[in-house]
Image (cartoon, rainbow, N blue to C red):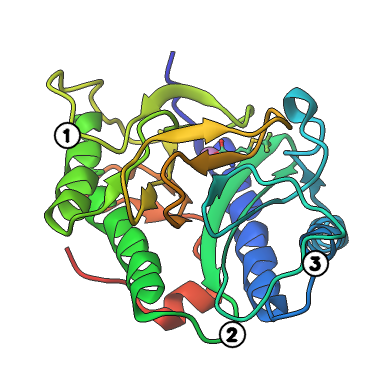
Amino acid sequence: MITIKDENAIALMRESNRLLGIVHDELAEAIRPGISTAQIDELGESLIRKLGGVPNFKNYNGYPASICVSVNDEVVHGIPREERILKEGDIVSLDAGLIWKGYHSDAARTHGVGSISPEAERLIRDTRNSFFAGIAKAVAGAHLHQISAAIDDYLTDRGYGIVRDLTGHGIGTALHEDPVIPNYRRRMPGPKLKAGMTLAVEPMVTLGRGDVEWLEDDWTVVTADGSWAAHYENTILITPQGRAEILSLGERERQIGIPEF
Ligand code: MF3
Ligand code: CO
């Protein structure tokens, strides 16, 4: 069942995600060679709590940290570790979320560590662009899989691999609600989008094929071919008319710029 949020729920979703935008802005500033993935998690958790939120990933199905920190060929759900030190040229995906008065937020960014290869730059930029290509279709009355198809087309045209084993999702009083939001084209149209739906759209993209494997820790998802991967996610609100509202954007993302689709 896809829940429709009323005005009160929408206000709380906005606030939860506004706070998460601040967390991501601050985490972006902390990324530099020499920082450990555990330090990123500690900083993220303390920012979330300082803002009055509760980390929603912590203990979710047993996940042991507040932030997912995934480096290079790790796609998502990397577990922060004291010994995992970022170095110049790496790329790092940060996935974070929080609960504010019962309402969840969820967003992810991929950052370069120091100076990175042009190929890695392009991967990060195009993964981000594919999100905006997708949500250009996220209007009331459209079908959910139009978002999926637009993401797929943007990425496939440019030769990227798309991870198919993981998807976006509805979000609200739970981190994961209906519907499932694939990042690849489906023949069936999927449910009709309605005003008041809140969705986490999150393309996961690779420089190789889209096949993934799970490490022995049962969490870390890596590419099967060792190619590098990027992840970009925001929580959005379907509005009565016109474009979706991006709830988790933050100041830094606005400054990088919103591509037109
Ligand atoms: N942000 C992830 C998602 O989009 C959730 C992380 S799973 C957790 O679904 F266990 F790490 F919380
Ligand atoms: Co998500």
Q: What residue type is labelled 2?
A: Gly
The local secondary structure at tag 3 comes to: loop
On residue 142, the disc is: 1
Q: Cβ of disc 1 within 8 Å of ligand 2?
A: no
Q: Nearer the viewer, mark 2 or mark 1?
A: 2
Of residues 50 and 152, the one nearer the viewer is 152
Residue 220 percent across, percent down from the top left = 64, 39
CB atoms at circles 1 and 3 under 8 Å apart?
no
| Mark pair 2, 3: CA separation | 14 Å
Q: What element carries label 1?
A: loop
Answer with the quarter of the image where residue 227 lies: bottom left
Labels 1, 3: front one: 3
- Which secondary structure, mark 2? loop
Answer with left or right where residue 84 lies relative to residue 261: right
Residue type highlighted by circle 3? Ser
Q: Mark 2 points at which residue?
A: 114
Q: In which quarter of the image is residue 162?
A: top left
Q: In terms of sequence position, does the residue under pointer 2 or pointer 1 come before the other? A: 2
Residue at far front of view = 225
Q: Which amino acid does label 1 sit on?
A: Ala
Marks 2/1: CA–CA distance: 41 Å
- Locate the N terminus and report the quarter of the image it occupies: top left
Task: Indicate left or right for 204 with 126 as reference.
Answer: right
**Is 101 in front, or is 259?**
259
In the rendered structure, find residue 36 and report the number of the disc placed on it: 3
Residue 171 makes an appearance in the image: no
Q: Distance between the residues labelled 1 and 3?
A: 43 Å
